[in-house]
Image (cartoon, helix red, strand yellow):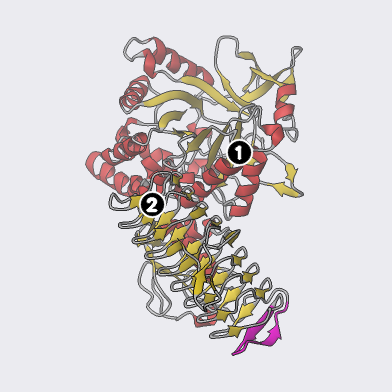
Amino acid sequence: MYILKPNKIYASEIAEFLNSKLIGKDFIVTEPSSIKNPKKNTVIYAKDAKMVPTNLKSVLVICPKGKVSAPYIPSNNPRLDFIRIVSEFFVDEGKHIIDERAVIEMGAKLGYNIGIGVNAYIGSEVSINDNTIIGKNVVISGKVDIGKNCVIKDNATIGSEGFGFEYDDDDIPQHFPQIGKIVIGNNVWIGSNSTVERPAMDETIIEDHVKIDDLVQIGHNCIVGKGSLITAGVILCGGVKIGKKCWISPNVTILQKTEVGDGALVGMGAVVIRNVKTLTVVAGNPARLIREIRKGREKDGRSD
Amino acid sequence: MAGLTDGVFKEKLSPFLEEKLRILKRKYGAKDRRYRGLAIQYLHSPLEERETCEANRRHYEAEVHVKFQDEAITGMERLYRRNMVIDLTMICAANCRYCLRGRYPQRTLTDHELVQIAKYCGHEKNQKDLTEVLITGGDPLMIPIKLDFLVDALADYAPNIKMVRIGTRLPFHEPDKIDNRVLKVFEKHPDMKFEIGTQINHPIEFFPECVEAVESLQDMGIRFYAQNVLLKGVNDDLPTLIELYDNLRKLGIEAHYLFHCIPMQGLHHFRTSVDKGIELIQGLTSCGEISGRAKPMFAAMTDIGKITFYEGTILERDKKGNLLLQSHYLYKDRMNWNPSWKVPKNAEIDEYGFIRVKYLDGRE
């Protein structure tokens, strides 16, 4: 994944890249650093101009307009602009290489520029599109389509048999064979040790730009809507439907076949047993409505 | 290739060029042709502020003004049938003083704008004619991640684009920046052919670091071609041109164009006469000292596009120093390709529908 790549870039060039303007003296920036530990010849960001220390030397600041003693680039969204700068100028993603110790079954379809880590297993009915990176020890089996530019981190398991059982007349649980398909869109991120289960029938769907943190369980037949962020430790039972641009906080559990509306925020540790309405905040066990989210304030309460 | 922020085309050198100029000056002195061959190209001269007959602040207009999916698209230029120019960014590692685009407004296209451009290039009505793009600015290799995004978008939305040309001087401005991040752009799309248009105006520019950077790109299967500029005091003599074009050939860079320096404000002192250029190109092409494989075409970038000088290209000369040049661009074709294009004031359509244009000559 990413490694720091020092560069020699003028502060004015960074401003030009952001279509903004450098206020203060131009100088060469070599790498990023943080507001807590700003280093010489680096770029940092601050959410508020008032937070910027006054004794900075040769440090470029990305922050909202205000009184800043160091050279700075005004920004309405300093964190986003900082991410853009770091991604464009100061990191290298490394070459995408298919490790010879990975197992790729006959019949698997691989696009261009795929990276596959050591000991990964790619099953025969798996299709992986261009530029996707599969980490070390990742297991992908069953019918799985993965889109372009995805990142599947180390130890993730995609397409393992779903957890479906039915008691028979002798109270013995009988397994419902899981023969469905998993469809993962473009630019999806799936964290380390996370699992995405194969459905019995139909599809488990993870739409474009969904980002799933480490240690997350996505049950069979779930649908996760475009751009939603699912943080660490979340458990989605079978058939859960998450809308678009939702934020599911750490350690949330969502009961099977429950729906979470677009733009909703589910607070930490919540146990969701009823449908969550669009643009609302819910939390607690069982999860209750805390408030509604006003249009344009969708980011409130979401962590960095 | 640079762009304005405060209305001033500032002097800007990359750390690499600064270092090389320092070394050359120390080694050979400030009057030596090797130092001057590089320094004149980048160092601001008070001569730029003189009032001269070159009054235009911007040379030629070819911007495509279209509404696509209810949005106005910016950042595209089109003069020719097959090719769309995309101005990705105006950032450059160094500012060439004679830059054609030095006075363009500063702008880097957003990801959304790039997707819209890619969709427009791949639109049904463009699919037949439009087969290539020239991504320039600015220097697109300064922001390889964004360039990569644009190339991906073209691959996704415009499968008719099979040839991607990139205008850059980065291998000669800051060769260290030709790294894995840049090379990666070219390895992802086996269906696309990449070419790099660059510019080397003096033999001194072939520093070992630069040669290495060019070769690393060539190893990716990219073909280089040179669009050099004839600059007074830099390369307006035959021995320099012979050495320059020999070196280009050795490095596997196609000679392509040698441009006459454009008539733009602040560039008077760079401009030879067109006749001097023709004389030099005749010397270069018929001197017997250099292989015909290494010979460029001598051309002018006029307000209606490039015109190569052949016999009969110059139709008239007026007292103010204007040349009337005959092109073989058909007006009706141009309007087909870019309906927002307007015939410049100094151009006219001849009886056959070809466009002729006045071009201000330089002086000796």
Percent x, y of residue A203? 59, 59
Residue A186 lies, in percent from the top left, at 54, 55
Residue B11 visible, this orientation? no
The percent position of residue B331, horizontal first and vertical second, equals: 73, 22
* Quadrant in the rendering for residue B223: top left
Residue B275 located left or right of residue A257 = left
Secondary-structure class at tag 1: loop
Q: Which residues are magenta?
A: A280-294
* Residue at image location 68% in from the left, 71% down from the top: A262
Q: Nearer the viewer, residue B140 or A195?
A: A195
Q: Is residue B94 left or right of residue A210?
A: left
Give the residue at x 62% y 65%. Answer: A225
Closer to us: B175 or B243: B175
SS at mark 2?
strand
Q: How many marks?
A: 2
Q: Is residue A49 above or below residue B145?
A: below
Q: Residues within 10 Å of mark 2 (few under 14, many from 20)?
A: many
Instruction: For marks 2 and 1, give the CA distance.
Output: 25 Å
Provide the major secondary structure of the magenta segment: strand
Is B101 on the left or on the right of B92, as rendered? right
Residue B158: numbered disc: 1
What's the amino acid at mark 1? Ala
* Residue for point 43% across, 17% down: B280
Instruction: Tell me if residue A199 comes above or below residue B39 in the rendering.
Output: below
Q: Identify residue for label 2.
A: A115
In front: mark 2 or mark 1?
2
Name the quadrant containing residue B362. top right
Q: Chain of mark 2?
A: A
